[in-house]
Image: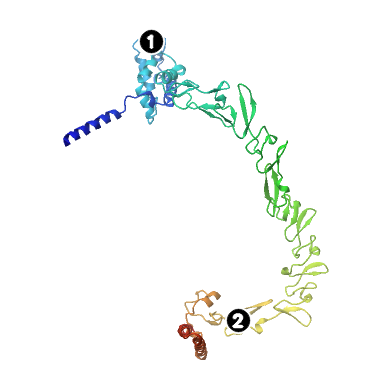
Amino acid sequence: MKWKMRYHTVALSCLLFALLWPGPTDSAQWTCATCKGITERFAEKYAETEKGGYGGGNTDWEETYLKEYRRSSKWRRMKKDGSESEVRLLEIIEQLCKHDNHACHALVEEHEELLEEWWQKDESPHDNLYKWLCIDHVKTCCPNNTWGPGCRDCPIGREKVCSGHGKCDGEGTREGTGACTCDKGYQGALCEQCSIGHYEEYKNTTHVSCKGCHYGCNITCKGPGLEGCLACHKGYNYVQGQGCIDVDECQRETPAPCPQGFYCTNIVGAHKCFKCNEACDECFGPEANECKKCRENHVLLEGECKECDPLCKGCKGVGPENCLKCDEGKLADMVDGVCIECAPACHGCTGPGPENCKRCRMGFKQNKQGVCEDVDECKTICRLQHEVCTNTIGSYDCECEEGYERNVRDACVMKIPGQEDKPKRSQFDKYMKPNKHPKKMLTGTTQETVRLVSIFFIVVLAAVVALVEPVLGAFVAVVGGVVWYFVIKTY
């Protein structure tokens, strides 16, 4: 029984294999483009082989045999067997397809007899090979303006295929739907209507012409230009009877069309912002004479921003006599309406030189003659051991002697050999990092005082808390003891 079932299974498999095995090649597998390409290359190779391979300078030989190589009615009357003609045909066929074009090779192989049959007709491939092979026999193509398996007519509108504004899907092939694919600006089954964003420029019984709306129109229009708009894009206003009118955004005050330091230029349907001249804070153009408002320490004179005198802090004109205030940061003061530069020793002055100071700056003092003179700070400060003081005008420098350096307590100590290149500790390191030698910082009586004071505060705090909550008091005593231990370890 099992053997019979296996037999039936094998038989059924063989039957299905036979049914599913592809049958003889038919025209359905070829595309029109493949067949058309073959006929075009046939015409090219036909022209190339007109003299190909049979020229070499032997004039007598060429006169005798080249005429036989050329396929003609006269030649057929002379050579009935057609041997040289077949050589030329074979040479053409071998060059019809590229190496990797499998569809081309398959079509040529399948219909080689048709090519041989046409070859005997002695007709030019430029005239009718395409129609004879691809349309009439292989049946992969259709005549112009027809489509599909039956080569049906493409849709005609206004006496033209797709009204002359589109392409018939599948035209010239045995494929496609025959529907019109319209050009830009056209729509409808026959491409005889204007699409959205276009208007009818011209229309009659045989022709329609559509043009795009002005870019200022918002989708729809009834004619050319802004006056033909039915709705407007941003940057335009619609005015009845006039269409879309450009909005000048640069005339808008709030919100300002451009940020401060930029000026506005209106363009059709929009605006652009450009940077003002560096002297301007507000402007209406790129030049220094197109300022509306000047930047700090500049003055607007005849439409142009000009820089104030360096001693001025604000001005009403150029020069030190036009200052509104004097720049104290530049040691300037107003004398008789003019800003002058005071001496470095002065904090305000009534004239040039240290003898005209209103008061002296820090680091200077007034002598008996009323002149601000430098104070020698080295007489009173920088007096610690191994420190060296150098007086400067209005200040001083306090450094360690040669061979000494400042430690973390800002004292000058002798440099340790081999550690001269160690980086100095910053103020951050001084206060945030633990000291490597804590016991050297507090010794003797000072250290004992710290211990006693810390113990006293811990005991008092624990006692006060214990009066309210005994358990909490014990907890405070333990925590205080831990803190006290770390404090002693640090100091």
Query: Pointer 1: residues within 10 angstroms few (<14), some, or many (20+)?
Result: some
- For the N terminus, give its image quadrant: top left
Q: Can the viewer see residue 403?
A: no
Q: Secondary structure at mark 2?
A: strand
Residue 64 lies, in percent from the top left, at: 39, 12
The mark nearer the N terminus, 2 or 1, is 1
Which of the colour schemes (rainbow, by chain, secondary structure, one colour) is used? Answer: rainbow
Residue 460: mark: none
243 left or right of 30?
right
Structural distance between the alpha carbons of marks 2 and 1: 126 Å
Instruction: Nearest to the eye among marks 2 and 1: give it.
Output: 1
Q: Nearer the viewer, residue 236 or 107?
A: 236
Residue 444 visible in the snapshot? yes
Q: Which residue carries the number 2 mark?
A: 388
* Depicted 316 relative to depicted 429: above or below: above
Residue beneath disc 1: 76
Q: Amino acid at mark 1?
A: Arg
The residue positioned farthest toward the bottom in the image shown? 445
* Residue at the image position 71 percent from the left and 69 percent from the top: 329
- Taking depth in this image into account, of 107 and 405 the one nearest to the observer is 107
Furthest-right residue in view? Answer: 336
Q: Amino acid at mark 2?
A: Val
Question: Which residue is drawn at the image coordinates 76% and 82% (left, top)?
Answer: 367
Check contact, mark 2 vs mark 1: CB within 8 A.
no
Q: Quadrant of residue 124?
A: top left
**Residue 14 location, x and y as percent?**
24, 30
Tag 1, which secondary structure?
helix
Residue at figure coordinates x 64%, y 83% from the top left: 381
Report the side of 192 relative to 45 (left or right): right
